[in-house]
Amino acid sequence: MREQNYKNHRKFYPPHHFIYLPLLIILEIYGVYKIYRDAENQLTWILFSVVIFLLFYLAFMTRQHYALGLQNRMIILEFKQRYFEIFGQRSDEIADKLKFDQIAALRFAYDDEFKELLYRALHENISGDEIKRSIKSWRADRQRV
């Protein structure tokens, strides 16, 4: 497996991202095309296009909602556990001061950089993207949804 870093840390689910969604997009384009080309069945093609759009929207939002909601919750719990292991203290107060994108970005840093970047996030309010760009030794997350 190749080394994970800022440029390649995103993950795709091929059946969803490269088959199902592109197929829906193609069908939607075809349906809109037929609305203007088939005046006799225009209402049918409008209905077809609306149904395809709703399937696309539902597929996208349902997948995103459940997977990301659970993943976000786990990332916050991981942050709290890691904070406790490093500092020996509860992290509720610290976690409340951080935005989620900062917490999520910190998981890519090893413990020595974690401390420094956490300090910067709290005192300089650097963004999650700035945290990721500041990481010198990337800690891969290969279990993302």
Image (spheres, grey):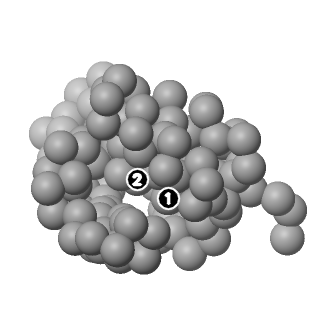
Name the quarter where the N terminus is drawn.
bottom right
Q: Where is residue 130 in the image (x, y as percent from the top left)?
A: 50, 28
Number of numbered discs overlaid on the protein picture:
2
* Residue on which disc 2 sits: 104
Label 1 crowd (10 A; few <14 / some 14-19 / many >=20): many
Secondary structure at badge 2 equals: helix
Question: Viewed as shown, does residue 88 lie left or right of 138?
Answer: left
Q: Quadrant of residue 29?
A: top left
Mark linked to residue 107:
1
Instruction: Give me the residue at 30% from left, 36% from top.
Output: 122
Using the image as rendered, state which of residue 100 and residue 8 is in the foreground.
Answer: 100
Q: What's under tag 1, amino acid-wise? A: Arg
Secondary structure at badge 1 equals: loop
Q: Quadrant of residue 90?
A: bottom left
Q: Position of residue 41 (x, y in %)?
A: 22, 40
Q: What's under tag 2, amino acid-wise? A: Ala
Q: Position of residue 116 (x, y in %)?
A: 51, 42
Instruction: Give me the residue at 49% from left, 41% from top.
Output: 117
Using the image as rendered, state which of residue 27 and residue 37 is in the foreground.
Answer: 27
Q: Is there any visible trace of residue 75 in the rendered image? A: no
Furthest residue to the front? Answer: 88
Question: Viewed as shown, does residue 36 lie left or right of 42?
Answer: right
Q: Where is residue 128 in the image (x, y as percent from the top left)?
A: 42, 37
Using the image as rendered, state which of residue 111 and residue 34 is in the foreground.
Answer: 111
Mark 1 touches mark 2? (CB < 8 Å): yes
Furthest residue to the right? Answer: 2
Mark linked to residue 36:
none
